[in-house]
Amino acid sequence: MRYEEIKIGALYPLTGDYAFVGNNIKKALDFYVYLVNNQNEICIPKGLRIPKLGCRKIRLIWSDTRGDSEIALAEAKRLI
């Protein structure tokens, strides 16, 4: 049985003047998704609350806003 992925759109400036912020956020979110998706295979500290998703996995769909609000709006509409 194949379970449907949970797709989450992530709009951040990955290039442009604010790329350093967006890329740091991307690293943190990618790591958190890795933890959630692989929590049965790795040791998770007891105090860390990570949601149980059954057999479903999270997949982040990245979109580069380039720090421009018009591009961000267009990308948000595209992801929706």
Image (tube, rainbow, N blue to C red):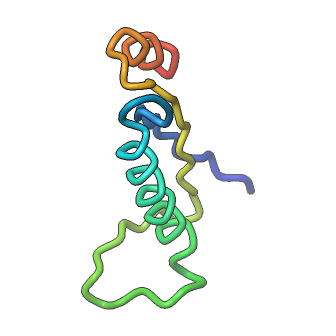
- Where residue 39 appears, as percent x and y from the top left, is 51, 77
In the picture as drawn, the residue positioned furthest to the right comes out as 1
Relative vertical location of residue 37 with respect to residue 25 in this rendering, above or below: below
| Number of marks in picture | 0
Left or right of 23? Residue 49 is left
Left or right of 25? Residue 43 is right
Left or right of 70? Residue 78 is right
Residue closer to the observer: 72 or 50: 72
Q: Residue at x 42, y 68 (%)?
A: 52
Work out which quarter of the rendered image holds the N terminus and state it: bottom right
- Where residue 63 appears, as percent x and y from the top left, is 52, 30
- Where residue 22 appears, as percent x and y from the top left, is 40, 42
Residue closer to the observer: 31 or 39: 31
Relative vertical location of residue 64 with respect to residue 77 in this rendering, above or below: below
Q: Residue at x 50, y 22 (%)?
A: 79
- Where residue 76 appears, as percent x and y from the top left, is 42, 19
Q: Quadrant of residue 46?
A: bottom left
In the picture as drawn, the residue positioned furthest to the front comes out as 17
In the picture as drawn, the residue positioned furthest to the left comes out as 47
Q: Residue at x 32, y 15 (%)?
A: 69
Relative vertical location of residue 35 with respect to residue 61 in this rendering, above or below: below
Q: Residue at x 39, y 18 (%)?
A: 72
Residue closer to the observer: 13 or 53: 13
